[in-house]
Amino acid sequence: MLSHGCISSIVAGNFVNGANILGMANGTTSGMAPLADIAMYKVCSSIGYPETVILAVIDTAIEDGVDVLYISFGTKSNQFWTAEALENMNVKGKFVLCIFDGNVTRIDKGHHVKDASGAGMILMNDELQGFNISA
C-alpha cells in the first residue's frame, strides 16, 4: 500500500547506486529532490484532528523552518484551490504538491501554481486513480 511515507521517499529519496528495473536501465537513481529534508508531524488521533492540534503542528513546522507545508485531511473540498490560497504560501520557484480530487481541474491547479510563481506542480492521485504521480 502506498502512503504518505512512500510518496515522500519518491520525492526526496536519496541516491542509490546500481539501481535497475528488471535488469535494464542500470545506473544511479534518486527521488526528485534527494537532498531535501522531510519533516512529518502527526495530527490525527482516535478522536480525529482537533483544530488546536492542527494549529500547534503548523506553528511547530514554522518554528522548525519548514519551506513547504503540505496538509491532507482526505476531503474532497476545493476550498484551498484558489489563487488566493497560495498567495501567503511562499511557493515562488518551488514545486507544489497537488492532490487530484476531481473538483478542480488539473489545468486550473496549474494556473494557480503559476500565478503564485511556483516552479511547477506535482499532481498526485489517490487509490482510485491508481496512485499515479504526474509532474
Image (cartoon, helix red, strand yellow):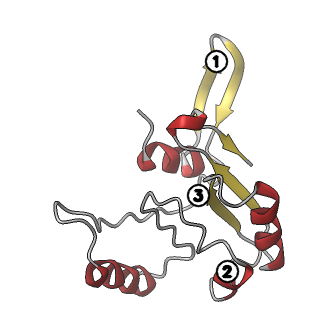
Read off the residue under disc 2. Answer: 86
- Whether residue 36 sits left or right of residue 39 in the image: it is right
Label 2, residues with CA under 10 Å away: few <14, some 14-19, many ≥20: some
Quarter-wise, where is residue 58 in the image? bottom left
Residue 84 visible, this orientation: yes
Disc 2 versus disc 3: distance between alpha carbons? Answer: 25 Å
Indicate the secondary structure of the residue bearing disc 2: helix
Indicate the secondary structure of the residue bearing disc 3: loop
Quadrant including the N terminus:
top left
Read off the residue under disc 3. Answer: 35
Disc 1 versus disc 2: distance between alpha carbons? Answer: 38 Å
- Whether residue 41 sits left or right of residue 11 in the image: it is left
Q: In this picture, is 94 found above or below 97?
A: below
Label 1, residues with CA under 10 Å away: few <14, some 14-19, many ≥20: few
Residue 21: mark in rendering? 1
Query: Residue 92's x, y, as percent?
Result: 75, 79
- Amino acid tagged 3: Leu
Disc 1 versus disc 3: distance between alpha carbons? Answer: 23 Å
